[in-house]
């Protein structure tokens, strides 16, 4: 009888210490960029777009000089993207640099943008995809 009580005590303690582990996922705070607002801050290619491609080898692990096209290294990204092949200014949502890698896409199987990165890329295209 003592062994049975000891067994139940150990089981109860293990449930007590291991039963209620919560890992909370903090939702991403996605910015809202209104392309029709003339007072909206301009998205900078150099300070906001290039870091999406280069930080942590996010894109440049494959899309580098001599690697997969387009070359998304900091020196070559704008000239590689500045064509109708990757940027569709009449319909920004259909631009390959946005549509293929956005979080809901099934086209690019390696890495995808976060929701915030996708909004920034789309906003940059909607603002004219400037080299600023």
Image: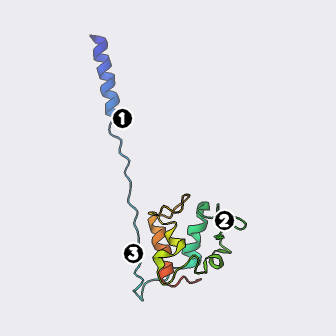
Q: In the orientation shown, which residue stands out farthest toward the top? A: 1
Q: How is the image coloured?
A: rainbow
Characterize the local packing of mark 3: few (<14), some (14-19) or many (20 or more) Cα atoms within 10 angstroms: few
Instruction: Give the residue at mark 2.
Output: 68
Query: Which tag, 1 or 3, sits closer to the chain's start?
Result: 1
Instruction: Give the residue at mark 1.
Output: 18
Q: In the orientation shown, which residue stands out farthest toward the bottom? A: 38
Characterize the local packing of mark 1: few (<14), some (14-19) or many (20 or more) Cα atoms within 10 angstroms: few
Between 95 and 59, which is closer to the camera in this rendering? 95
Q: Count how many numbered circles sit on residues in the image.
A: 3
The structure residue drawn at horizontal position 29% and vertical position 14%, both measured from the top left corner, is: 4
Name which quarter of the figure residue 131 lies in.
bottom right
Q: Position of residue 63 (x, y in %)?
A: 65, 65
Image quarter (top left, top right, bottom left or bottom right) of the N terminus? top left
Q: Position of residue 119 (x, y in %)?
A: 45, 72
Query: Which tag, 1 or 2, sits closer to the chain's start?
Result: 1
Q: Nearer the viewer, mark 1 or mark 3?
A: 3
Evaluate if marks 1 and 2 touch, with contact meaning CB atoms under 8 Å apart: no
Mark carried by residue 57? none
Question: How far apart are the two marked residues, 1 and 3, measured between alpha carbons?
Answer: 40 Å
Mark carried by residue 32? 3
Q: Position of residue 54 (x, y in %)?
A: 61, 66
The structure residue drawn at horizontal position 50% and vertical position 79%, both measured from the top left corner, is: 124
Name which quarter of the figure residue 57 lies in.
bottom right
Q: Nearer the viewer, mark 2 or mark 3?
A: 2
Between 103 and 108, which is closer to the camera in this rendering? 108
Whether 99 is drawn above or below 131: the answer is above
Is 40 left or right of 45, judged from the image as shown? left
Give the SS element for disc 3. Answer: loop
Q: Nearer the viewer, mark 1 or mark 2?
A: 2
């Amino acid at each position: 009888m003592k062994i049975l009580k000891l067994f139940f005590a150990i089981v109860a303690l293990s449930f007590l210490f291991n039963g209620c582990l919560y890992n909370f996922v903090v939702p991403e705070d996605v910015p809202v960029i209104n392309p029709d607002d003339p007072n909206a801050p301009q998205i900078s290619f150099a300070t906001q777009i290039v870091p999406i491609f280069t930080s942590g080898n996010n894109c440049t692990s494959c899309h580098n000089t001599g690697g997969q096209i387009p070359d998304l290294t900091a020196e070559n990204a704008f000239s590689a993207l500045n064509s109708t092949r990757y940027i569709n200014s009449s319909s920004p949502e259909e631009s390959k640099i946005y549509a293929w890698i956005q979080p809901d896409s099934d086209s690019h199987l390696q890495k995808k943008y976060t929701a915030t990165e996708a909004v920034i890329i789309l906003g940059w295209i909607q603002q004219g995809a400037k080299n600023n």
